[in-house]
Image: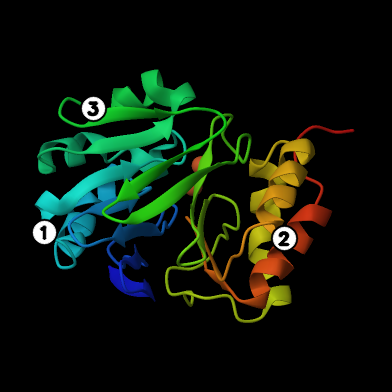
Amino acid sequence: MLTKKIYDGINHQWIMFGRDPEKPKAIIDTNQYMVRTRNNALLMDPGGIELFSAMLANVVKQVPVQQISHVFASHQDPDIISSLGLWDKALETATLHAPWLWEGFIRHFGMENISFDAIPDEGSTVTLDSVTLQFIPAHYLHASGNFHVYDPAAKVLMSGDVGAALEPIDAPLFVDDFDEHVKSMHMFHQRWMPSNLAKNDWVNRVRALDIELMCPQHGRMFAGDNVKRFLDWFEALDVGTAIKR
Ligand SMILES: [Fe+2]
Ligand SMILES: [Fe+2]
């Protein structure tokens, strides 16, 4: 599994994990993210059961396991958080931040030690040492209760399934040719995103944020001007297309 530091600040770092060559072919490839502060770490969308051992091995190279005090699940999907029951055994004490709507569902993955912080619909924040991260509402994109993580100091938005692309395991980490990359995103967003109303509401709110790096859970990350290109493209896209209108 590849490990890449994507932000290196005075008080914290962002680290991406992904492109695991051991991953079975029939399983969708995922990106996992971690914010590390002085004494704490937040794991974001830590992934499925099948990549838990690779994730744990790579995460502990970056941070002692005792310092992983927070976990975040953008929504309830198995590719997001089905590893929860295993993290529950590995982490001594930690809090899972996830949409309130999905608590009774996410607990099916197994959660005895980790405590549940139910994020209200309007969002909330979490502070690790001196670093505050925001849980930004992204409901219906694609899950009915869904959040992204915004870091105003690093200007990073972890955008869950928004910005996702279906690509080979050896795809580059960053979008280079945006127009070419659209081919890998088009079907994913049209089919998995159900609501134009939700999409446009999200685009309007995210446009107001200062973002240098947008980090989806599948595919490549968007840096610099490609963030704005994505927002323009997504705004213009008609989604929810499985229903004929
Ligand atoms: Fe999902
Ligand atoms: Fe996903």
* Residue 177 percent across, percent down from the top left: 66, 81
Q: Quadrant of the N terminus?
A: bottom left
Query: What residue would you read off at disc 1?
Result: 64
**Which residue is found at the position 15% from the left and 52% from the top?**
67
- Mark closest to the chain's N terminus, 3 or 1: 1
Q: Is residue 152 visible?
A: yes
- Mark closest to the chain's N terminus, 3 or 2: 3
Query: What residue would you read off at disc 3?
Result: 110
Q: What secondary structure is found at the residue carrying circle 1?
A: loop
Distance, label 3 to label 2, CA atoms, is: 36 Å
**Which residue is found at the position 41% from the left and 59% from the top?**
31
* Residue 71 percent across, percent down from the top left: 30, 43
Q: Amino acid at mark 3?
A: Gly
Within-10-Å neighbours for mark 2: few <14, some 14–19, many 20+:
some
Q: Amino acid at mark 1?
A: Pro
* Residue 191 percent across, percent down from the top left: 68, 43
Determine the residue located farthest toward the top in the rendered image: 104
**Which residue is found at the position 47% from the left and 55% from the top?**
217
Q: Amino acid at mark 2?
A: Leu
Query: What residue would you read off at disc 2?
Result: 231
* Residue 215 percent across, percent down from the top left: 50, 62
The image quarter in which residue 104 lies: top left
Front of the two marks 3 and 2: 2
The image quarter in which residue 137 lies: top right
Within-10-Å neighbours for mark 1: few <14, some 14–19, many 20+:
few
Distance, label 3 to label 1, CA atoms, is: 23 Å
Q: What secondary structure is found at the residue carrying circle 3?
A: loop
Apparent side of residue 115 relative to residue 139 in the rendered image (left or right): left
Task: Decide which of 156, 184 is in the foreground and name it.
Answer: 156
